[in-house]
Every structure is written in C-alpha cells, then in structure tokens.
Amino acid sequence: MTTARRPDAHRVASTHRRIRAAAVMLLAAGAIMIVATTPAFGDHVEPVFVASNPNCASIESTWDELKVEPVSDGTYSDGTLTVTVDVDGSVFDWSSDIGVDAVLVKGGPDANLYRYDPPAEETADTGLHAPTNPANDQFYGLSHISFCYDTAGGPSPSPSPSPTEIETSSPSPSPTILGTQTERPPTTSPTSTVAGERLARTGPGTGALALAGAIAVLMGLGMLGASMVIARPPRRA
C-alpha cells in the first residue's frame, strides 16, 4: 500500500512569497502606466497653447485682468477679484471669490490658456502649468499668471432718479392772501384830539383805554359845568 507524500511546509511558504511579490510588482507597473498615460491638464479644462506673451485683452477685449508676478503662494486682489494661489514647483492650484473666465499661465516663450467660459465661469482649479519645454519634456517654470474675468454679470448700477422723483420744496403760501384779495394791515386815521394821538402812538390796546379815560374826563367836566350853572343864583334886577 502506497502512502501519499505531504507537501513540504517550507516549499509552500516560499511559493506564497513569490506569488505575493509578483502581485506587488504587477500593481506597481500598472500604477506607473496609469500615471504615464494621464494627460497633464487642470481638473476642469484642457489647456490651449498660445504663442508669445498674450494677455487677457488679447484673448477677449472685454476681459479685465489680475496679473500675479512673480508667482508664489498667497492671496492677490485688484479690488474686484481676489484669488488665492497655491504653488507646488511648476504646478499650481487657485481659488477665487468671483467667477473667472480664463487663466493664462506664462512660462518660457509662450503660454497656456485655461478657458472656462464658455460654458461657465469657475472659482477654482488645480494642476495648472505653463507649456512643456521640448528640451527636457518638463513644464517651463512659472513666469506669471493672468486671471481673466468680466463684471458683466455683476449687479447693475442704480439708475439715476427721474426728474419726477426728485423732491422739490413747495413755495410757502403767502400769509396775506385771502380769497382773491390781499389782506392789508389796518391803518389808523389821524385825529386832532389828544386821545386820538395817544391812541395812534400807543396802539390799539392802550389807545382804547386812553380814549375811554379821556371821554370819562370830558363827561365829568361837562357834568360839573352843568351843575355849576344850575346852582348859580339868578341875578337881581
């Protein structure tokens, strides 16, 4: 009767180690192939090569430009657009507070254009770079970055008020107009009496009192004269 030989444990362990090593090598080779075949462009758009040294206005005449030069980590603003740049060697990421239409990346003799609008403006992107140097197949160093944007989508300025909206002051009504006639201040007729002169000098209030007093004095004198005439005895013949 023949007995089956059991496999050597040492040989089995050695075989397993060789299989694991081969698997690791295959995974590493696959990763290298994936990296090598991945196109070098930003997360959102593929760059377009632009010869020479363009600016935003040379691409679109209506674009404004925020230029960053030299290129380094930091936050930059022109009062309208604010961008934050994060540089890693010859590649950079950016983010902004308002929409950006395009980014020009200058390096070497030429530039790369990352255009987002159309279809739509962007407020961030990663992995941007200058054109490739044919001498070494590496990206040119970053000379400067131009962020292109427009304010056409911003809030419209408030319209000026029409002439009917401007408040005008109404003329004050004339205090002397009553109906269709002009009210005239009362005039005091000149008098020849002392009481009249006092009335004219002192005004209506005190003049009335003075006139009443004068009349009372005159009446008193008249009554006194009458009583003297009545009381005088007749002359003897």
Image (cartoon, rainbow, N blue to C red):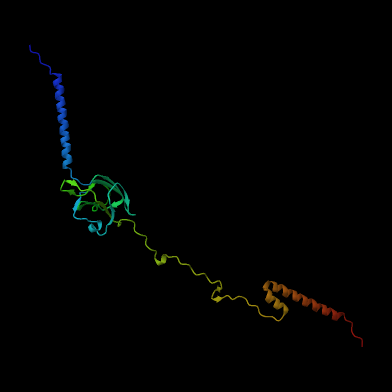
Q: Residue at x 72, y 79 (%)?
A: 194
Q: Residue at x 80, y 78 (%)?
A: 221
Is 88 left or right of 179, judged from the image as shown? left
Question: Residue 141: horizontal and vertical position, in percent?
Answer: 22, 48
Question: Residue 215: horizontal and vertical position, in percent?
Answer: 75, 76
Residue 199 showing in the rendered view? yes
Up the image or down, 108 lies above or below 157; here it is above
View extreme (bottom): residue:
237
Question: Residue 30: horizontal and vertical position, in percent?
Answer: 16, 36
Q: Nearer the viewer, residue 160 or 6?
A: 6
Q: Residue at x 75, y 74 (%)?
A: 213
Is 142 left or right of 19, judged from the image as shown? right
View extreme (left): residue:
1
Up the image or down, 139 lies above or below 162; here it is above
Up the image or down, 196 lies above or below 84; here it is below
Which quadrant would the C terminus be assigned to in this image?
bottom right
Q: How many marks?
A: 0
Question: Residue 151: horizontal and vertical position, in percent?
Answer: 30, 56
Q: Quadrant of residue 87?
A: top left
Q: Nearer the viewer, residue 84 or 162?
A: 84
Residue 126 showing in the rendered view? no
